């Protein structure tokens, strides 16, 4: 009955999508596309609700072919319309194509058992569809070759959208890999031949644009996106050629070598004229994905090729086919030769394409990152003359290449990461010293110049300083155990220069921000490795950094500024303060060992450093700045953490700093972000719990800090704990409280009730006296009584009692919150 029902649905929508060529022509002539779009949605729903075999067979009862054949024919027509329209706006063809590609992804992206049910006719349909896709896009690419820049970007407008479609195209290609990969080989061979005909008088622009597109689609067919992880050879490429055991015959190998040989031609100065920045971007992107998938994969070097879960039922020769794919660029020194070629291409790109930011970004952030991702490749990498040339060029502080300061950071991080391939820690640390030493020396020299104030504000000097700071950041971000020593030495060498530069560039927000961000990354990488002496050096420097920044920025955002300038100034402070909070948080992550008994030195207490940092930073954080969500999360995460771990330090803060923290907590409890509210409730819980436990032990607790405070409205409150008790009851009873925060609210409310019992009873009594409805009054009195008396609640703050109070508060809110908020 279900199958009959689905067939009836399919029969009903056929008139909207069949025949596809007729329907497409009618729409392009002015007919509404709504029915056709609905028909595409119907196919997607049918594919989702059925197995591949059932989906294909639905149409066979009313047509001499299967549903997949119809899907293929329909997709072909939509692709043709899509590539002809080429409009930047979303069109009916673009919408229909997305739906149909999702349908193909459902069919071809199922489990392996379901994939086997794709019929021979279905595989043939996928093969024919891929050929049409490629032909249409090649034609569109060739026709757009002479358009102006804005029009020529029809396929490049949205990278994520482009890659999503290319990924779907690749899935279709792999369904018939034995046909589609040889098809791509033929297309590449034809266009490579045209480019290599140096006497050819025809304009190669069309061919180059076609090659750009072919490189993109081939990269998707041969590889899967690793999302930062090392990629694996797509299984379809292994199964599709399981009977091919010789490396030289394997289509994937043939296609890969063809593209590598083509990429190598960019090293020839005569041929380089054909490699536009756009084409080189596609070449570089392809190499980055190819490196991650095929270049000297680790399991191939072990000689053991296996795929968990596929030991049975795979075609004969499946494992051998996979071994061919994994080893063809790793055996007989071929992998090292390819690695050398790729490094040379990357170096050439940095030198030959100045100002081409997209190309340079792909080179630095994709290709170089892929090269250093695996240690066994780094072992070969650091032995190449080409890599050492790159490192020596980079080590010259005045050789900045023509890349942005951000890409300087990425390149530095990559070069330092490669140190993992050296034989031991001593060699790795020396490699980093040689790489970063000239840069640290430059900063030391420039900071000690007598004419520093005069030269520092020159544009080229500012640019140089920014680039070198980004390089320091990159090295710091690449910290690993075997290079930690050299990077710590680097950081220590620039500590004094950084303080000098912070004072010199106090009005250059970009430089100030980079100094702060370097310290964030430096502390993050170093803090888990440091001993007492090194920790003392680090935290002392951080304190001095904070003090200088504070002295330069207190009151800097003036209310007398125009609204636009004030907004811009706040945006700058927002970035800086986030960096400062991240710095303090990273110091917090240090395992806070008590070094006070160390024979080496009297090391400072890190907790005190953090609170001193908070004392410096908090006055800079206005309530307006806390409206920035990311800054709020960072700030309240740090405050709640420190109050929970070191509440005893609160009593030592001066009254102004303490009041400021309390005022921000008051603000945060009313925040729209549930995560911020939860952190503030945790902080209040920590404050009240500490005071209650200390007073019960006969100690001072928060002492005078509890007697008065200024809330967020600037008015004097009658007491910190009483203020938060009133605030929390107001939130629970009369405001739009989120029940997912009930547990954190209960944890904060219990110690407040225990500390302020008299106030709590008075507030409850006042609330009951204001209730005029006797029924509601009785109900409310019963709920308040149950809150503090049911479930054998005691005056303890141990875990079982907190759990009982959580249950009580949940029942209380369920009982009274509805009618209280109505009032």
Image: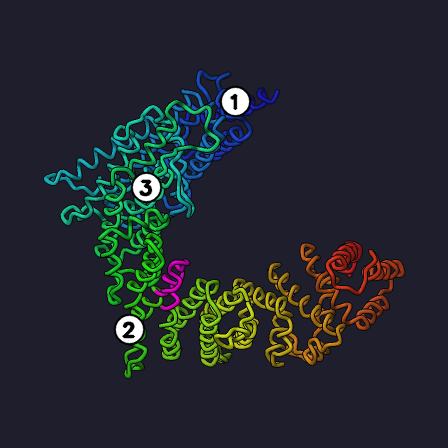
| Residue indicated by mark 3 | 296
Q: Nearer the viewer, mark 3 or mark 1?
A: 3
Along the viewing direction, whichever of 407 and 230 lies nearer the viewer:
230
Who comes first in sequence, dot 3 or dot 1?
Answer: 1
Q: For the residues marked 3 and 1, what is the alpha-carbon distance in whole angstroms?
A: 42 Å
Q: Which of the numbered marks, if any, corresponds to residue 234? A: none
Give coordinates of residue 565: x percent, y percent: 44, 74
Q: Main secondary structure of the magenta part?
A: helix
Q: Secondary structure at mark 2?
A: helix
Q: Is residue 368 left or right of residue 748?
A: left
Q: Is residue 159 above or below residue 299?
A: below
293 up-or-down from 736: above or below: above
Element marked by disc 3 = loop
Between 369 and 556, the residue placed more toward the observer is 369
* Residue at the front extreme of this rendering: 599
Q: Which mark is residue 461?
A: 2
């Amino acid at each position: 009955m279900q199958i009959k029902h689905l067939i009836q649905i399919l029969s009903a929508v056929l008139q909207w999508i069949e025949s596809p060529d007729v329907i497409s022509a009618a729409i392009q002539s002015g007919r509404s596309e709504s029915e056709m779009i609905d028909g595409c949605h119907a196919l997607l729903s049918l594919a989702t609700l059925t197995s591949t075999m059932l989906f294909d067979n639905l149409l066979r009862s009313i047509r001499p072919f299967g549903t997949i054949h119809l899907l293929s024919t329909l997709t072909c027509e939509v692709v043709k319309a899509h590539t002809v329209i080429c409009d930047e706006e979303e069109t009916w063809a673009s919408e229909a194509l997305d739906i149909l590609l999702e349908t193909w992804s459902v069919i071809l992206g199922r489990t392996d058992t379901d994939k086997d049910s794709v019929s021979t006719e279905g595989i043939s349909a996928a093969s024919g569809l891929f050929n049409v896709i490629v032909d249409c896009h090649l034609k569109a690419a060739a026709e757009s070759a002479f358009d102006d820049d804005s029009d020529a970007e029809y396929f490049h407008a949205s990278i994520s959208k482009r890659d999503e479609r290319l990924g779907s195209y690749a899935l279709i290609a792999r369904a018939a890999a034995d046909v589609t990969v040889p098809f791509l080989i033929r297309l590449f061979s034809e266009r490579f031949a045209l480019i290599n005909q140096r006497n050819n008088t025809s304009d190669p622009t069309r061919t180059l644009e076609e090659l750009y597109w072919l490189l993109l689609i081939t990269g998707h067919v041969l590889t899967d996106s690793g999302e930062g992880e090392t990629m694996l050879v797509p299984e379809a490429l292994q199964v599709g050629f399981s009977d091919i055991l010789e490396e030289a015959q394997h289509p994937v190998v043939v296609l890969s070598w063809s593209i590598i040989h083509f990429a190598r031609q960019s090293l020839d100065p005569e041929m380089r004229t054909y490699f536009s920045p756009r084409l080189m971007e596609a070449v570089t992107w392809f190499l980055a994905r190819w490196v991650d998938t095929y270049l000297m994969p680790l399991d191939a070097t072990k000689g053991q090729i296996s795929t968990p879960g596929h030991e049975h039922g795979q075609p004969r020769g499946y494992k051998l086919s996979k071994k061919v794919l994994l080893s063809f660029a790793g055996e007989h020194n071929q992998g090292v030769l390819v690695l050398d070629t790729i490094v040379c291409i990357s170096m050439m790109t940095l030198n030959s394409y100045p100002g081409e930011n997209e190309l340079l970004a792909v080179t630095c952030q994709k290709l170089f990152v892929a090269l250093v991702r695996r240690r066994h490749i780094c072992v070969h990498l650091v032995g190449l003359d080409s890599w050492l040339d790159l490192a020596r060029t980079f080590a010259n502080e005045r050789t900045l290449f023509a890349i942005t300061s951000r890409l300087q950071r990425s390149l530095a991080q990559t070069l330092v990461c490669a140190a993992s391939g050296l034989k031991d820690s001593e060699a790795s640390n020396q490699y980093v010293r040689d790489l970063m030493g000239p840069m640290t020396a430059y900063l030391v020299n420039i900071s000690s110049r007598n004419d520093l104030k005069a030269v520092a504000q020159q544009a080229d000097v500012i640019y140089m300083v920014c680039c070198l700071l980004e390089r320091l950041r990159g090295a710091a971000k690449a910290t690993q155990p075997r290079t930690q020593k050299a990077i710590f030495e680097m950081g220590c060498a620039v500590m004094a220069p950084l303080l000098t530069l912070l004072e010199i560039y106090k009005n250059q927000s970009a430089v100030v921000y980079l100094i702060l961000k370097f310290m964030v990354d430096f502390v993050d990488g170093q803090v888990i490795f440091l001993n007492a002496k090194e920790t003392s050096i680090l935290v002392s420097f951080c304190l001095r950094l904070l003090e200088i920044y504070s002295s330069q920025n207190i009151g800097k955002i003036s209310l007398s500024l125009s609204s636009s300038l004030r907004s811009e100034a706040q945006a700058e402070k927002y970035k800086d303060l986030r960096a400062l909070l991240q710095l303090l948080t990273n110091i917090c992550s240090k395992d806070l060992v008590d070094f006070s008994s160390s024979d080496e030195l009297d090391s400072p207490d890190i907790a005190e450093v953090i609170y001193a940092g908070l004392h410096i930073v908090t006055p800079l954080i206005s309530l307006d700045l806390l409206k920035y969500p990311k800054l709020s999360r960072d700030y309240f995460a740090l405050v709640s953490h420190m109050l929970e771990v070191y509440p005893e330090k609160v009593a030592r803060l001066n009254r102004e700093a303490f009041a400021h923290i309390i005022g921000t907590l008051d603000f945060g409890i009313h925040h729209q972000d549930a995560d911020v509210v939860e952190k503030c409730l945790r902080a209040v819980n920590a404050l009240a719990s500490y005071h209650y436990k200390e007073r019960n032990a006969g100690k001072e607790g928060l002492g005078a800090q509890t007697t008065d405070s200024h809330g967020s409205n600037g008015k004097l409150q009658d007491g910190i704990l009483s203020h938060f008790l009133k605030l929390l009851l107001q939130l629970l009873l009369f405001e739009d409280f989120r029940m997912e925060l009930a547990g954190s609210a209960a944890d904060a409310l219990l110690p407040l009730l225990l500390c302020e019992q008299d106030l709590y009873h008075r507030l409850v009594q006042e609330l009951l006296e204001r209730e005029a409805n006797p029924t509601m009054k009785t109900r409310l009195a019963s709920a308040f009584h149950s809150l503090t008396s049911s479930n054998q609640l005691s005056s303890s703050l141990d875990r079982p009692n907190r759990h009982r109070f959580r249950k009580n508060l949940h029942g209380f809110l369920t009982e009274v919150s509805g009618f209280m908020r109505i009032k």
